[in-house]
Amino acid sequence: MPSLLGNIFKGWADYSKGNEEGGHHDYEHMYALVIDLDRCTGCNACSTACYAENNLPVVGEDKFGARQAMHWMRVERYFDEPDMDPDMGPDTSNIEDANETGTQSRGASFLPMMCQHCNAAPCEPVCPVGATYHTVDGLNAQVYNRCIGSRYCANNCPFRVRYFNFYDNSESWPAPMEQQLNPDLSVRSKGVMEKCSMCLQRTRAARDTAKREGRELKDGDIQTACQQTCPTSAILFGDLLDEASAISKVWKNHQVKLGTYKQDKENPELRGYRIFEELNVDTKVLYLERVREV
Amino acid sequence: MTTKIDRRNFLKVLGLGGAGAALAGCDMPSYATMEEGEEQVFSYLAPEEYMVPGIGIWYASTCLQCAAGCGVHGRVREGRALKLEGNPDTAVNKGKLCQMGQAALQTHYNPDRITKPRIGGKEATWPEALAYIKANASGAPVWLTGSIGGHQAVMLDTHLSASGGGKHYAVETVNAQAWQAACADTLGDAHPELHIDKASSVLSFGADFLGTWISPVKFMTDYGEFRGAPRGVLTVVEPAMTLSGANADHWVAARPGSQAAVALGVAHMLATEYAVSTSALPAGAVDAIVAMTPERVSELSGVDAKTLSKIADTLMSNHPSLVIGDGGYETAAAAMTLNLMLGNIGATITPGVELIPADLGVRGGSTKALADFASDAQAGRIGTVFITGTNPVFTAPGGLMMKDALAKIDLKVAVALFEDETTQMCDVVLPLASPLEDWGTHVPPSGAGRGEIHVQQPLMEKLHPDVLGLGDILLGLSQDAGADGLADFDDYYAYLRTAISAMIGTDLETAWQAVLQAGKVQAPAADRVFAANGALTTNVPETNAPTAGQLSLITTARQGLFDGRHANLPWLQEAPDQISKAVWDSWAEIHPATAAGLGLKDGDYVTITSDNGAITTRVFLYKGVHPDAIAVPMGRGHTHYGRYATGIGVNPLSLLDGTADGRTGEFTNTTSVRVQATGDNRHLVRLMDVDRQYGRKLAATISADQHRRNQGGA
């Protein structure tokens, strides 16, 4: 039985290690995503696949308008391109134009947005009951049974990707629709916060399969629902602690490191970036910039 | 499940029964385990065959949400279909699926499905319904369907020929008939294979290949490759932004109906500025190109010479290219002239395949068939009609007077999943099995599989015992009409199995199982050969400006509610529209300058009036629509389509007059309308009300030059 003092020392050692070696965590895996915005067409297949996989309720127009929709994965759409080319300055011609009769000269910019599974997640320390915490898989997890609905976590999330069940959404599945519900995860009830779990149930299933087959989990065994359906293969999921994994290579190639709020890239023109990096929340979703012909 | 339950296991089950029951409702892994990797506790004593509690099994089948026929894998657990994914072994969708495909589960589990036959709106039994049909049939029956292919089409033909030789009308509101006609006229092949992945640049004139055109998931998987290194450039010219337009490097707004002029203008530019030879073109096309000077293009379309030159330059510096066009034969034909000039034939456009059992081929739906049906019905040439897979009362242009036409038919039989505006007018409604409960074969129209036919098999038991598959209904009707050679088949499954066994040359059980497992079967097929026949015509309309004081209404299709068939799927109603991000209601897209002229602001209600009717909806202001146009997406505005669709939004198709294109007979999807504010305003519910990032690095962009310097970012 470890002593209280022992725990404090261990905690301190971990903390100082994290400070010295950027991004150090005692994880068994560190699941992360890469989203290539140049491939993303904004078709919304990822979002609907998420509804199907994760038992997300449909709330209807009024609640949607009250920002009570439960889309764990949402596709945002912007018309301006603030940082298209440093030499050209911000481009907002799609929105405002000296010539008001002008039409758009380019398409839109789409941004799939879901829980960024921050390594230094601002939602975690504010939970009064520890319902949201980091797992050994490096995931930001939500324990529905523990959640008391204080909503402090959602308040603290810079990405607005936590969704609160203001209502009992069971009318979302009139018979026989409830038969479609995925039995691998629960249906959340009123008063509970929920969010993207990076399809935790698929991780567990893949791990069970690997164990049953007597082998180690390998890169590509786990696909999130959004990744699997994405028609342009814009989404990649994997373990950053596995240096041979496809996702580790992408992070490395784009010279993006964890554990920092300012990337020191040798080549700053590489497309990889993390959203709101300056907040030092250490997100684990790497976005690749959309490319546009000038 | 054949494992014997011995006493020891029995006690285990007994002892853990309570825990097992509790577990069933909790957050569980895919396997009913007490601990990870321990699989000894089963909650049932004698599960059915293939039903291992807690274990998901994947079955291959085919998606029927649109006519593209993507292969799917359905996850089945405890006898229920839970999730669909793309079948990774198909050439069409390579393991991918769009949101309409994902939502097929809600078609299947929809609470508004028809579960029993109905006569005159009252529930009946199958024998009663069939007896009623027999007693009241008048003349040779005809079929009105959506796009249909494979063995169901063969069976449909069998029924028609055995019962008097009535016609088959295949209707599809969102189709590629104009493009296919232009391909047939230039290449002698209406269905060539397109290779977006092999193109360095793609120029589209209103063909929404990422959204709704021919085989969107196939094109999206190709688009992913297209955007890889070296990165292809996408240019889109259209009057209102589609999903493809929303992904364009260069987006050009053209006045509605003027895309053909722009395409010919680009050809003019290529011939004059870049000395591209026009020798591959028929003489008429050359004359049209010579006549289409930049000044003329600007006059017709509002697209200036600088833009034309940029498009031409993009095509010239990114070779090979692919030019596609739809929404009018002239547009498609003009796009094909560009392909001929640029030498894309054989590079990004290659010959398609011809199935050797030709009767299996797709009867691709058209709107011409709908017009033919309406005029035949109006003229009293139809006595009995069977309707399935289409909702003509909803999708027909208002000018077609579809309700009147239907009313002239003595016996109308709907074979349908849901009550809709059409079934409401039918005398008999036969309950159809859902696509996840039915057998069938489907021929993907993209030709990517080179003759691979996708097999549809049931993923689960029928939810409602009285529903019947389309094949079974067709077989029964054909047998009843005395068709030859069908007497031995008890059901459509038996027929299909025999037919496929004949195709693969073996009736071994293992071979059949292999077909089912793969979800596809290779049909005998031959590559077609391109044969130019020079029939290409390129008559550009003299003018296409709307009547003074009016706007051109454009009815747009979106990957989502599509032509309205998916409006009863709550996931898709709640899925924000890709462009406007609106949910659960219709809207009208209008240019801010036009809106200012009409005194409109975001969320204002307007009444849009044509000669055929009026609709009232809210405006959404943005610059992705030509100032002369107002665009209303189709899909909503149902008056009778279950709890999720009825009474929501408006149907812009009702405003169209059904004017037909000269070459193809397809409806033009625009008409002149008057737009008037009602004075009401209500916030349009959208995913997000901002269109800009306010300088934050959210969806960041990099210029292609920077990208190229880094070889695509490794």
Image (spheres, coloured by chain):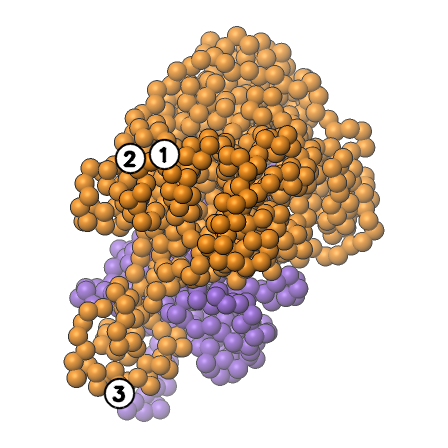
Q: Colour of chain A?
A: purple
Query: Is mark 2 in CB contact (under 8 Å) with mark 1?
Result: yes
Q: Chain B is drawn in which colour?
A: orange
Q: Which of marks 3 and 2 is in front?
A: 2
- Circle 1: is it few (<14), some (14-19), or many (20+) Cα within 10 Å? many
Residue B15 tag number: 3
Q: Residue furthest front?
A: B135
* Residue type pointed to by label 3: Gly
Viewer can see residue A86:
no
* Residue type pointed to by label 2: Ala
Q: Return the residue at label 2.
A: B523
Position of A227 with respect to B3 (left or right) is right
Q: Return the residue at label 1.
A: B360
Q: Which of the two labelled residues, at mark 2 and mark 1, occupies the earlier sequence position?
A: 1
Instruction: For mark 1, give the secondary structure.
Output: helix
Image location of residue B52, percent across then percent down? 27, 68
Q: Which of B311 and B1 is in front in this view?
A: B1
- Relative to B663, say whether B585 is above or below: below
* Residue A24 falls in image quadrant: bottom left
Q: Nearer the viewer, residue B655 or A148?
A: B655
- Circle 3: is it few (<14), some (14-19), or many (20+) Cα within 10 Å? few
Q: For marks 3 and 2, give the CA distance.
A: 54 Å
Image location of residue A266, percent across then percent down? 40, 49
User: Disc 2 is attached to a residue of which chain?
Assistant: B
Q: For marks 2 and 1, give the CA distance.
A: 9 Å
